[in-house]
Image (tube, helix red, strand yellow):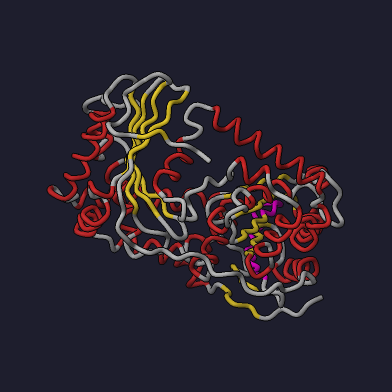
Amino acid sequence: MSILLAIAFSATPSALAADPLLMDAGPQGTSVHKLANGLTVILQEDHRTDTVALHIRYGVGAHDEKLGEHGCAHLFEHLMFEGSAHVGMNKFDEWLTAAGGENNAFTSDDQTAYHMTFPSGAKDLALFLDSDRLGWLLDGVTQGNLDNQRMVVLQERAEGYEQPNGRDWDALQTLMYDPTNPYHVPVIGTVAEVQGFQIPAVHGFFKAHYRPGNAVLVLVGNFETAAMLASVDSWFGSIPDAGPIEPRAVWKEGVVAAHDGFLEDSVEQRTVYLAWPSVPLGHKDAPALDLLGYVLSGGRGTRLDDAMYFDKNLATDEGAFPYAMDAEGMFIVYATAPKKPLTKLASVAESVIADVITTPPTAAELDRAKRQYKADLLDPLETLESRAEWLADCQFYDGRPDCLADRWKKIDAVTSDDLVRVTQTYLTPERRTSLSIVPKGDTGMMPGADVVELP
């Protein structure tokens, strides 16, 4: 068994009372540990159930892919279930399911995460399975497995794009970011690059990113902290320390040129997306942009919803929200209607946004937005799986798991003047990009829009 470097954090009773993410965490609270190989481990007891939730977050996503690697992060989401040195092909799911567990994974622009739930008695099986694919996956990444999963990924891409509105998000990001930007290429990758993946490059990508020092492992549920920590160290501690990770691209604010694009799709209604480059996660203006989304769209009594849906019935669906990533961000407004001109929908949306500046949000609007934000912040904490994911994200971005109280303080400090300021700063006409989605053969896209070609 390797030697633990340190216990970096142990929640005190006052910390538990201050941060909702750590409430009801059991007699030992929430603790953070660092194994000698660099793996961060967060443990939180919860004896109200016999279940344990495991969430492991790797700091690798589409953001980290270089030319020739686009789609590789998502590919490994598949390969991680295809067998490793001591787990045969298809045995990961078979063994875990037989023990009463279940699992899944997801890949985003900035992370790949694997999560599972299982009865407490299956603890060692779950830890064995997850540690084997971190430490010894490449023994199972054969040419046959690679060829098979390449085809699975390409089929998944084709099936997703064939769905109504299945290309919208990828088209918006491709339109928003130029080819030199790490967010330009969709998470699922390009057809040419996925087809071209070969064993040496795929192995190299795994070695560069799947290492203990680039992972946060969280376990929440029915266990004793000391015993679980010993088990984690037993299974994960022998994985070698592969050293530091290459620094990621950082956000740089600059001049942004507006773009207008369109897609023809198998849809019955037209949709227009308006998007403005904004700020990445952790930026000082992110809380104000979050609340601006709630002021604009959150049901009757919010500005965009009333103007587009409740009062004038212009759109069948609409909304506004910020989307922040590790190195970029955007603020998005969308509206869908059967036959309404997209120029009309866009004009109404832009007038609602401009009105934030001329008629600042009232105290009542701001209070409602904060209450909605707080509810959305707390609701996911009711399940072990969501709580484990939050703990991992807090540790990754804030350096500790007790981040929700601080995040709420930043939200609660936002003023109406802040909403006006971020609207004036980021949501200006010259920074706006539009994406029109129209039925096949429809010519109702925004004027001057060019077809968006997905790689």
Residue 117 vs residue 105, the one in the foreground: 105
Q: Residue 64 in the image: state x and y as whole percent.
A: 56, 59
Part of the protein shown in magenta: 39-53
Q: Residue 405 in the image: state x and y as whole percent.
A: 42, 64
Number of numbered discs present? 0
Magenta stretch: includes residue 123: no
Q: Residue at x 19, y 49 (%)?
A: 361
Magenta stretch: includes residue 49: yes
**Residue 438 drawn above or below residue 273:** above
**Residue 203 located left or right of residue 157:** right
**Residue 99 located left or right of residue 36:** right
Q: Residue 292 in the image: state x and y as whole percent.
A: 29, 50
**Residue 269 drawn above or below residue 3:** above
Residue 425 vs residue 118, the one in the foreground: 425
Task: Classify residue 6 by image quadrant.
Answer: bottom right
Q: Residue at x 28, y 22 (%)?
A: 340
Q: Residue 365 in the image: state x and y as whole percent.
A: 23, 47
Residue 320 vs residue 115, the one in the foreground: 320
Task: Classify residue 144 by image quadrant.
Answer: top right
**Residue 418 located left or right of residue 391:** left
